[in-house]
Amino acid sequence: MSGPETISLSRDRLWIENHIPHQGLMCLLDRVERWNEQEIVCIARTHLRADNPLRTGEHLGITAAIEYAAQATAVHSALLIGEGEKPGSGFLTSVRNVQWHRSRLNDLGDELTVHATRLSGNEMTVLYAFAIFAGSQKIIDGRVGIFLNSDAAPPLADKFGRLPHETNSP
C-alpha cells in the first residue's frame, strides 16, 4: 500500500460481521490485514469451505470473487465511518473491466488476499478497483461501483411501478 499512512490494526471476522450486513456463512472475509483512507487488504479462507453459500455443487466459480471484493469495500466503508457507527446497506451498481485468470476459487490452496482501492466517491456512490490474489498469483481484478446507504434512499417506484411524482396524481 502506498499513499496515506497505513493502519495495520487487524480486525477479525467477528468485527467484520458486526460492521457489515453479511452475517454467518455469507460473511466471506476472515480478517482485515491493513487499511488506510484509500485502500484495504483483507484475507479470506472461506473459498475452501464446503459450506460456502456461493458454491454450486462442488464448484466455487471465479465470479464469486466479485462478492469478496464487494465485501472488502463494505468493510472499508465501515472503517472509514469509525467505531460506534454502522454504515447503511449498499448495493452493487456496476462491475467493470473484470479480468479473471482462472475459472474456480475452491481449488486454490492458498488464502485469498483481497485488495480494494477507492478511486472516487461521495455520500451516495463510490467506485473501487479491486484485485484478488492466491499467494502471488493474481486470480481476478476489475472495478465495482456501489450505491451507498440504500436504506435512506427514496424508492424508485412503488409496488405498482409508479414513480414518486406519479403517485400524487388523481
Image (spheres, rainbow, N blue to C red):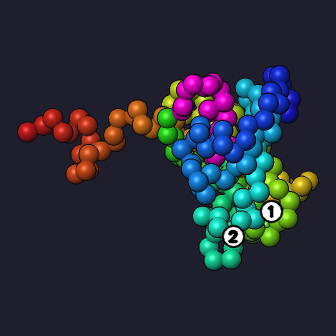
Measuring from the top left, give residue 167's x and y in whole percent: 18, 39
Q: Which residue is mark 2?
A: 50
Numbered label attached to residue 101 = 1
Measuring from the top left, give residue 68's x and y in whole percent: 68, 52
The C terminus sits in image quarter = top left
159 left or right of 74 in image: left
Q: Secondary structure at mark 2?
A: loop
Q: Residue furthest top?
A: 5
Bounds of the magenta segment: 70-87
Tell me which residue sits at (66%, 43%) in the image.
14
160 left or right of 1 in image: left
Amino acid of disc 2: Ala
Measuring from the top left, give residue 90's x and y in whole percent: 51, 40
Can residue 18 be spotted in the picture? yes
Nearest the viewer among 86 and 154 is 86
What predominant SS class does the magenta segment belong to?
Answer: helix
Tell me which residue sits at (45%, 38%) in the image.
150
Nearest the viewer among 75 and 17 is 17
79 left or right of 1 in image: left
Measuring from the top left, give residue 86's x and y in whole percent: 54, 31
Can residue 144 be spotted in the picture? no
Whether residue 127 is in magenta: the answer is no
Q: Secondary structure at mark 1?
A: loop
Whether residue 82 is in magenta: the answer is yes
Q: Residues within 10 Å of mark 1 (few under 14, many from 20)?
A: few
Amino acid of disc 1: His
